[in-house]
Image: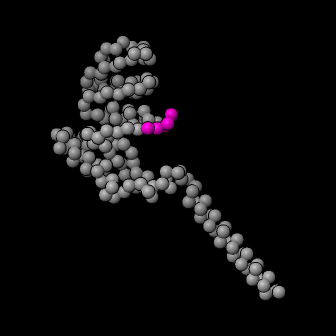
Amino acid sequence: MPQSSTAAVLIGATLVVVLTLWLVVKVRKRSGSVPVDRAATHMGRGGRIRALLRPAVAAKAKRFGMDQKKHPGLEVARTVTGNLPLHSSWEDTCLDIRGPRTSKTISRAIPAVLSAPGAVVATSNKTDLADACTGPRAKVGTVWLFDPQNLRNTATEPT
């Protein structure tokens, strides 16, 4: 009997140590991460994102006759692993579907409007986009603001 109880204690202690180590590793992996970090292993990389990298987008801009250094395309995101910037070309269509208060205007709309090399049509149901972009865009050309609800208390005339 003493041998079997010693074996049971050793097996139990080993099991406790193994489970504790497993739990510590699992908690450390998750701390500081968000669900998208765990999904990063399933996201595109290498050849699958090559068309979204700056060299490919800049080559397309050059084919369009644009200054590829000044206007290669729009930065749309960064990869979770590697923090590489991903770009859309001026020919691409982008659609962002995000929830409320997820920085759509600050992270996507304002940079897109301000970096566009030509005419821009942008819409918003708040004044933040127009407030941020009207002044800088007016320095490079005419800005028409259509404000049917008169949110900005301005006339719909060019600035």
Quadrant of the rendering where the C terminus is positioned: top left
Is residue 73 something one can see in this rendering?
Answer: no
Q: Position of residue 48 (x, y in %)?
A: 33, 55
Q: Residue furthest right?
A: 1
Query: From the viewer's perspective, is 21 left or right of 77?
Result: right
Q: Which residue is nearer to you in this view: 153 or 36?
A: 36
127 shown above or below 88: above
Q: Identify which residue is drawn at 34% across, 35% down.
A: 112
73 shown above or below 47: above
16 shown above or below 141: below
Q: Which residue is nearer to you in this view: 117 or 45?
A: 45
Is residue 71 something one can see in this rendering?
Answer: yes
Q: Identify which residue is drawn at 82% across, 86% down.
A: 2
Q: Identify which residue is drawn at 76% across, 80% down.
A: 8
Q: Position of residue 52 (x, y in %)?
A: 31, 49
Write the start and end of the magenta stretch as one range: 97-102
Query: From the viewer's perspective, is 38 left or right of 74?
Result: right
Magenta highlight on residue 100: yes
Query: From the viewer's perspective, is 69 left or right of 3?
Result: left
Magenta highlight on residue 96: no
Q: Report the predominant secondary structure element of the magenta stretch.
A: loop
Q: Identify which residue is drawn at 73% across, 75% down.
A: 12
Q: Residue furthest top?
A: 155
Quadrant of the rendering where the N terminus is positioned: bottom right
Disc tally is: 0
The image quadrant of residue 140 is top left
82 shown above or below 88: below
Q: Position of residue 19 (x, y in %)?
A: 66, 68
Q: Which residue is nearer to you in this view: 114 or 44?
A: 44
Q: Position of residue 30 (x, y in %)?
A: 57, 56
The image quadrant of residue 142 is top left
